[in-house]
Image (cartoon, rainbow, N blue to C red):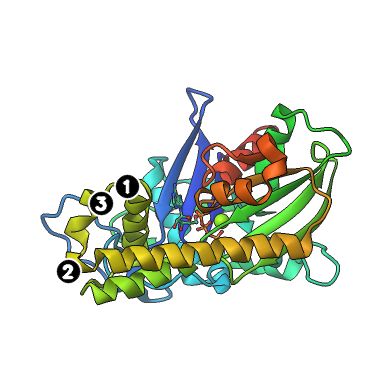
Amino acid sequence: MIKVFCDDGSTAIKLCWYDKQHHEPKTLISQNTFTEGWKPVGFASDPIYNYEVDGLKYSFSKASAEVIPTTNIDFQYRTENLLSVHHALQLSGITPQEIELWVTLPISEYYTNHDAQENTFNIQRKISNLQRSISLNKRQVFTFGKIRVYPESVPAVVSALQIDNVHPLEQSLVVDLGGTTLDCGVIEGQFDSIAKISSDAGTGVSLVIRHVQDALLKADTLSNYYVADTIIREMMAGNDVNIFPLINNVEYIATVKTAFEISRNRLIEKVIQHVEQNYRGFHRIYLTGGGAEYLYTAFNAHWSTFKTKIKKLETPQLALVKALAEIGKHQ
Ligand SMILES: Nc1ncnc2c1ncn2[C@@H]1O[C@H](COP(=O)(O)OP(=O)(O)OP(=O)(O)O)[C@@H](O)[C@H]1O
Ligand SMILES: [Mg+2]
């Protein structure tokens, strides 16, 4: 049974697997944008993915403004999660078959609140949800012979701690900013132990996305999460010309930009506050998750004495799933 590693976040599924011929890990990012009902099969160039779960019909739709919202903590146990994982697997190019699937849960869900032990109830709830039956029109689906659940954030830094030759007494803070949740943890040495964990299920990039979506409405533009995210990324990269086709009333571009800047700064402040309220005495900071792109510059300015000891992991959105694949290779 082949293993497929899957960081099934609320906004995007990140997959990693090993190709039989090459031992290089392959990766893929798939967006969680589904609408209710099926799409007509026609002349369009994109393949159609029409799913059915419990007698209800769903379809993958990257640009529709009517996609089912996924930026909530409950996503982990809902039909949208089942759909998103199966959809990412379909895009991987792996032949549908029985696989061993590794998935993730935010720290706040993976551990119990009171004594930081594995929350077996939530872990089982997630596994049961993924074992639900699903069908895909005119295609085979994957089945899961075994499902393993891992916590988010902390595993992402396993290899970075080794590369940085971290001292056994050093404490490294990991900050994983996702679409819905902020997951943090402190690791001692090169993963000798996890000293502390914390999570804030209300702090994520979706706070910024929602503000930008509201501002886009002023520009007569109804957008889904993925479209708003694409507009933001183009603005961050300074490629304004690329967003003109997506905004109906371009006179309001300045309004959209201001909304973005205000909510981005507010998000950064919330993350810094969370770290300051929960952690002391750390020596290094590792940023991961798609939100790392938002935080890197601000963290460097705020903890300026850390200098090179603040790192954004390479391909931060994929760092966790790549780390899981590295762990899973030897098991
Ligand atoms: N390169 C990038 N530049 C700017 N923003 C990015 C980039 N990559 C990802 N993002 C944004 O970061 C968000 C979080 O990405 P990530 O994949 O870590 O979230 P998630 O795992 O789906 O969420 P969660 O862990 O909270 O369930 C994305 O939804 C996207 O808006
Ligand atoms: Mg995530």
**Residue 23 image offset from top left, x and y in percent:** 53, 24
**Residue 243 image offset from top left, x and y in percent:** 24, 55
Task: Depth check: give the residue in front, 8 or 21.
Answer: 8
| Label 3 CB-ligand 1 distance < 8 A | no
Quadrant of the rendered image containing residue 249: bottom left
Mark 3–mark 2 CB contact (< 8 Å): no
In space, the residues marked 1 and 3 are separated at their CA atoms by: 6 Å
Question: Do we see residue 76 in this rendering?
Answer: yes
Name the secondary structure under disc 3: helix
Q: Which residue is mark 1?
A: 238
Left or right, 1 with reference to 239: right
Left or right, 328 with reference to 321: right
Quadrant (top left/top right/bottom left/bottom right) for the C terminus = top right
Which disc, if any, is residue 249? 2
Residue in view at x 83 percent, y 38 percent = 189
**Residue 293 image offset from top left, x and y in percent:** 50, 48
Name the secondary structure under disc 1: loop
Quadrant (top left/top right/bottom left/bottom right) for the N terminus = top right
Task: Depth check: give the residue in front, 261 or 328.
Answer: 261
Under mark 2, the amino acid is Asn
Residue in view at x 87 percent, y 35 percent = 168
**Residue 80 image offset from top left, x and y in percent:** 45, 68
Q: Which residue is mark 3?
A: 240
Residue in view at x 55 percent, y 58 percent = 178
Q: Callout 3 environment at 10 Å: few (<14), some (14 to 19), or many (20+)?
A: some
Mark 1–mark 3 CB contact (< 8 Å): yes
Sequence-first disc among 1 and 2: 1
In space, the residues marked 3 and 2 are separated at their CA atoms by: 14 Å
Question: Do we see residue 110 in this rendering?
Answer: no
Under mark 3, the amino acid is Asp
Left or right, 86 with reference to 175: left
